[in-house]
Image (spheres, rainbow, N blue to C red):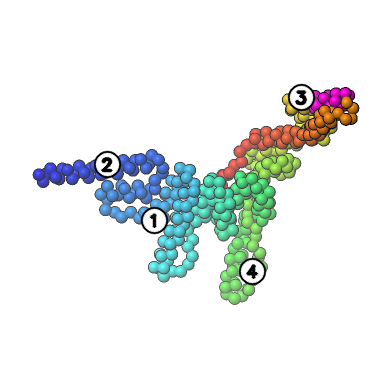
Amino acid sequence: MKKAGKDSRLKTQDGLMGSWAHKLISLLAHKPISLLLLYLVSSSYGGSSEEIEYYSPENILKFAEYLYQEGDYLRAAGEYQRYLFYSRQSASSSLWESGVRGDFRHQDTSSILYKIGLCYRQAGDTGRAISFFREVVTERPKSRLHFAASYQIACSYFLAGQYESSIQYINQALNETRLETQDSRLKREGERRKREEGRGKREGGTSPRSSLLPLPLPMSSSEREQLQILAAFNYLHQRWWRDAEHILGSVAPEDENLLVLASALRASAREGMSLRRKNPILAGLFSAVLPGTGKMYCKQYGDGLYSLTLIGVTGLLAWDGFRENGVRSIRGWLFGSVAGVFYAGNVYGSTIAARIYNRQLEADLLRRLPAVPDEMDF
C-alpha cells in the first residue's frame, strides 16, 4: 500500500511537472518570455541550490538585448532604463559601504542611453528618441557616441518628416564643431595639457581664470560629410533641388559607399532641376481657348475629352434655346449657366491638373531615391 501510494504521488508530481512544462511551451510559442522567468523555472526543477539574482543589472541587460534583437523595441527600452536604475542603485550602495561619496558614472551609460534612443526611434516615437540622444550629446560631450547621437537626432527629425528641424540641427552641429586634421588633433592635445596645467595653478591660487576658452568639439571630415549627405536628403524631400546640389558639390568622401550615395543624390538633385514640368498658367489658357485642352496638356486625356464634350453639349443646348425663344428662353439660360460653371471649373481645374502633374513627377523622383542611412559606421 505504501509503495502504491508513493507511486501515485510520483505520478502526480510528474503530471504537475508535465503540465507546467506544457504551459511554459505554450507561452514561448505565443510571446517572448523573460530570461529571468526562464532562470526561475530551470532553477526550480533543476534542483540548483544557487540563488539567482533576477534583478541584477547583468541579467536585466541581457534581457534588454534579447528584446531588442527580437524587435520588441518598447519593452527593450523599458528594460534598458531598468538596467540604468539598478546599476545606479548598486553603485550607490557600494560607494556607501566603502565610505566613498560620488556620482554614478557607469562606463556603458552613454551606450545604454543611445540604445534607448534607438529603441524609441525604431518604435516610431521620435520625440522620446531625440530626448535620449540629446542627453548623450549635451551631458556626455566626450562620449565616443557623441557624433552618433548627433546624427541620430537629425535622422529622427528626418524620419518624422520635420525636414526644416533636421536641417537646422545639422547646421547647428556643423557650426559648433570644427574639422579635425592630424595637425589640429596634435594641437588639441597640447592645448588640453595647457588647460590641465592652468587648472593646477588655479587650485594653487596663482591664477583665477584660464586664458584658454573651450574649443568647439572636433569632427572628422567623414563625419561632416555624413551630416551633409543627411542634409541633402532633407533638401531633396522639400524639393529644394538647388540647395541639395550645392551642398553635395562640396562632398568628396573617401569612403566608397558614401561616395556612391553622394553621387546618386547629386544626380537626383540635377534631375529634379531639369524635370519637364507643366505650366499652370499655360494649362489654364489652353482650356480657356478650347475647353479640355489644358487637361490634355497635362496628359489627362480622358478628363480633357470629357470636359470638351460636356461643355460643348451644354453650350449647344443653350444656343439652341436662345435661337428658338430669344433671351426669354428658360432652357437657354439654364443650360447657359450650367455651361458657364463647367467652363470656369474646367479652366481652374486645368491649372490644378498642372500642379498635380508636377507633384507626381517630383514624387516619382523621390521614390527612386536611395534609403537614408539611419545608422552610419560609427
Find numbered disc 3 in the image and state the secondary structure of the residue it sits on.
helix
Is residue 111 among what the camera can see?
no
Q: Is residue 222 above or below residue 184?
A: above
Question: In the image, residue 369 lies at what x, y percent?
Answer: 65, 36
Magenta: predominant secondary structure element?
Answer: helix
Q: Residues within 10 Å of mark 4 (few under 14, many from 20)?
A: some
Residue holding disc 2? 18
Question: In the image, residue 274 lies at what x, y percent?
Answer: 76, 34
Q: Are marks 2 and 3 in contact (CB under 8 Å)?
A: no
Q: Residues within 10 Å of mark 1 (few under 14, many from 20)?
A: some
Q: Is residue 246 above or below residue 332?
A: below
Residue holding disc 3? 305
| Side of 358 relative to 82 (left or right) | right
Q: Is residue 192 above or below residue 321?
A: below
Q: Foreground residue, 64 or 92?
A: 64
Q: Residues within 10 Å of mark 3 (few under 14, many from 20)?
A: some
Q: Residues within 10 Å of mark 2 (few under 14, many from 20)?
A: few
> The residue under label 1 is which amino acid type?
Ser
**Residue range highlighted in magenta:** 308-324
Whichever of labels 1 and 3 marks the residue nearer the N terminus, that label is 1
- Name the disc covering residue 210, or none: 4
User: Which numbered mark, 4 or 1, is in the foreground of this view?
Assistant: 1
Q: Is residue 319 magenta?
A: yes
- Name the disc covering residue 56, or none: 1
Whichever of labels 4 and 3 marks the residue nearer the N terminus, that label is 4
Q: Is residue 318 above or below residue 355?
A: above
Q: Quadrant of residue 205?
A: bottom right
Separation of marks 2 and 3 at Cα, in angstroms: 75 Å
